[in-house]
Image (cartoon, rainbow, N blue to C red):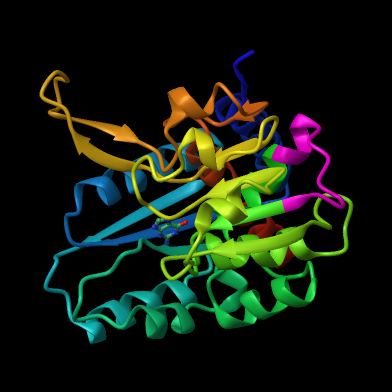
């Protein structure tokens, strides 16, 4: 029997409704949560994500600011934008869309954002808190969204083998930290595979929960997946497709049609993890704003 779909869109909808209700309560107390999204350059995929983030914010009743800067923006100019947003009381969350152009040191920009406005959870202070299990910080939106999706679908994680493919700072590494915690919604035995892993299939075949976040279209094939596994596909790559109106289509890291035959639950691409990322961003922004009124 083919796997059931893990419907990220539906769970994200629930979360966004909860965030909208929380936002309305906070607005009644005189504070409208505000999110600033900064986009440097004109990468088409990033432009699409940034637009969705702004739209989702407005739909939840939040204040939304999008700052678009040219691809040749200097580090000093971007630093000045971040400083202004750090100082702006109407802005509770700041997100600088990654990747950034080569002339900009991304880690320096991340460190410049005040940890209490770092709704991406990328600042070393928030990364450190997440690693030690201190829930007071912000957790990166994609891994946090995956954890919530598993929880709300009733997937048992404690004692399970969780294999993560990919070690990015945005998904793979924080995903490890989350699934490793001694909490009911985690408590997994975690393995991470990456570009230097010699026999990836030997690891992925042991996974009860397989999280693919390598950014490599269709990397995970049917024979790499244990029958009955829960498969989460974080990948979203554009591949050429002359039969589509746009000339491309979006594909994940998982060969969906064949893996669906062996998995028990699987996320589609698009419509799986992506909507959860945006929902968690709104949740983090609401939390950042709530904290200003304590
Ligand atoms: N690029 C891809 N995913 C993300 C994300 O979650 N946050 C930011 N800032 N950039 C990204």
* Rendered position, 252 above or below 215: above
Q: Is residue 148 left or right of residue 74?
A: right
Residue 20 can be seen, yes or no: yes
Quadrant hosting residue 3? top right
* Rendered position, 273 above or below 262: below
Find residue 104 and report its horizontal and vertical position in percent: 25, 80
At x 37%, y 52%, the residue is 215
Q: Is 170 contained in the magenta span? A: no
At x 12%, y 28%, the residue is 247
Quadrant hosting residue 264? top right
What is the number of callouts on the image? 0
At x 14%, y 20%, the residue is 245
Q: In the depicted view, which residue is nearer to us: 24 or 72?
A: 72
Quadrant in the picture for the C terminus: bottom right
Q: In the depicted view, which residue is nearer to us: 109 or 22?
A: 109
| Residue farthest along the top direction in this orientation | 1
Quadrant hosting residue 203? bottom right
* Rendered position, 76 above or below 251: below
Find residue 60 and report its horizontal and vertical position in percent: 56, 37
* Segment tinted magenta in the rendering: 150-161
Residue 91 can be seen, yes or no: no
Quadrant in the picture for the N terminus: top right
Q: Is residue 244 left or right of residue 95?
A: left
* Rendered position, 21 above or below 189: above
């Amino acid at each position: 029997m083919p796997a059931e779909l893990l419907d990220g869109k539906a769970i994200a909808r629930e979360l966004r409704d909860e965030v909208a209700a929380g936002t309305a309560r906070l607005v009644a107390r005189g504070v409208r949560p505000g999110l600033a999204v900064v986009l440097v350059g004109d990468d088409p995929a990033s432009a699409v994500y940034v637009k969705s983030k702004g739209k989702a914010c407005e739909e939840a009743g939040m204040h939304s600011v999008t700052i678009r800067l040219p691809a040749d923006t200097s580090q000093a100019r971007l630093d000045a934008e971040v400083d202004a947003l750090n100082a702006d009381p109407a802005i509770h969350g700041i997100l600088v869309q990654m990747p950034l152009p080569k002339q900009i040191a991304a880690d320096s920009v991340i460190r410049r954002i005040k940890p209490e406005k770092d709704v991406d959870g990328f600042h070393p202070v928030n990364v450190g808190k997440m690693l030690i299990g201190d829930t007071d910080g912000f957790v990166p939106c994609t891994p946090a969204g995956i954890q919530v999706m598993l929880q709300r679908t009733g997937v048992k994680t404690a004692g399970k083998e969780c294999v993560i493919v990919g070690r990015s700072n945005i998904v793979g590494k924080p995903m490890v930290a989350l699934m490793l915690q001694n909490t009911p919604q985690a408590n997994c035995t975690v393995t991470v595979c990456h570009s230097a892993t010699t026999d990836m299939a030997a690891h992925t075949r042991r996974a009860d929960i397989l999280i693919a976040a390598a950014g490599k279209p269709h990397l995970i094939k049917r024979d790499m997946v244990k029958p009955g596994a829960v498969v989460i596909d974080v990948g979203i790559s554009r591949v050429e497709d002359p039969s589509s109106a746009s000339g491309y289509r979006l594909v994940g890291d998982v060969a969906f049609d064949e893996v669906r035959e062996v998995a028990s639950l699987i996320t589609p691409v698009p419509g799986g993890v992506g909507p959860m990322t945006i929902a968690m961003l709104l949740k983090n922004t609401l939390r950042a704003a709530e904290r200003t009124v304590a």
